Image (cartoon, grey):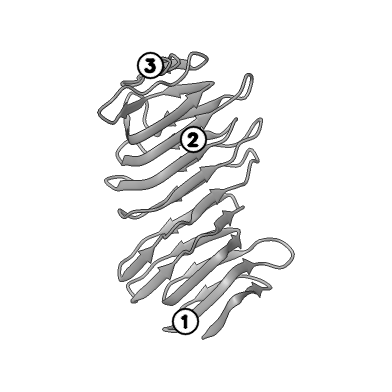
Amino acid sequence: DASATNATIRAGTAFTMSGAGTVSAYRLEVGTVTPSALTWNAGTLTVGAGGVSAKNFSSAGTATRALNMGSGIWDMSGTGNVWSLGGSGYTIDAQTSTIDITDTSATAKSATFTAQAWNNLRVRGASGAGAVTLGSSGITHTFNQVTLDPNANVVFHSTGTFGMSGLICAGTSGNLVTLTATTANNHAPITVSSNVVADYMSIKDSALSGGRTDYAGSHSTDVAGNTGGLLSDPPPPPT
């Protein structure tokens, strides 16, 4: 067990929870020189407002375990599978946390989630950034808000479903947000229940819905295979 509720726990190299212990910290930093892997296969992990800094996060197996994510940012700065959650026996409270996929190199990234309520997800972007594949087959992915930065290159899993309260895909001129699906001509269904803020996007094989009109912005490009959403700006509010 380790408790530093009002302080930071720093692990010099990879940090692995494999026994029925408890770790509580205001902030968890994995890797003192460069970020390393955070593995949670057992026990209770509670993080406060300071969040987490790690190369990636993974969890597997059948051990009883609990994760309390707090109100901070979970900075995942690696490549490859930066967020991998599987197995059984887990209980997760996403609280008001944000999972932030921050690597903007040309190397591909992916993140797989379980069918439960997550809070916020952010994907960073830069010129030439590698694709970030989100989701898994047959899983209903539920988020509070998803934010895709300018030049973010995001691939939604075609046979998963994605629900969110808010979606922010606000690119800029010359810095488009790219949305595609894992399988061409197989729509990745995306349901936004409340708010879409979008423009300067390149969209392919996506299906936007939510019981209202979604406006993807007049500077966006409909590449092919899309349903739902208008490539125009929203009308002005009534006067």
Nearest-to-viewer mark from 2 and 1? 1
Question: Is the Cβ of the residue at disc 2 closer than 8 Å to that at disc 1?
Answer: no
SS class, disc 1: strand
Report, in whole angstroms, how far the alpha carbon at label 3 lies from the one at label 2. Answer: 34 Å
Q: Residues within 10 Å of mark 2 (few under 14, many from 20)?
A: many
Of marks 2 and 1, which one's residue comes earlier in the chain? Answer: 1
| Residue highlighted by disc 3 | 238
Query: Residue 173: percent from the left, percent from the top?
Result: 62, 19
x then y, percent, for residue 171: 57, 26
- Asked if the residue under mark 2 is in contact with the one under mark 3, i.e. CB atoms within 8 Å, the reply is no
In which quadrant of the rendered image does the C terminus lie? Answer: top left
Of badges 3 and 2, nearer the viewer stands: 3
How many residues crowd mark 1 within 10 Å: few (<14), some (14–19), many (20+)?
some
What residue sits 32% from the left and 27% below the top? 207
Q: Real-space Cα distance between discs 3 and 1?
A: 54 Å
Q: Is residue 127 above or below residue 49?
A: above
Q: Where residue 129 appears, x then y in whole percent?
A: 62, 35
Label 3 secondary element: loop
Q: Residue at x 40, y 38 (%)?
A: 166
Q: Amino acid at mark 2?
A: Val
Q: Residue placed at 52% from the left, 77% from the top?
A: 24
- Residue 134 appears anywhere in the view: no
* Residue assigned mark 1: 22
Q: Which residue is mark 2?
A: 154
Query: Which amino acid is tagged 3?
Result: Pro
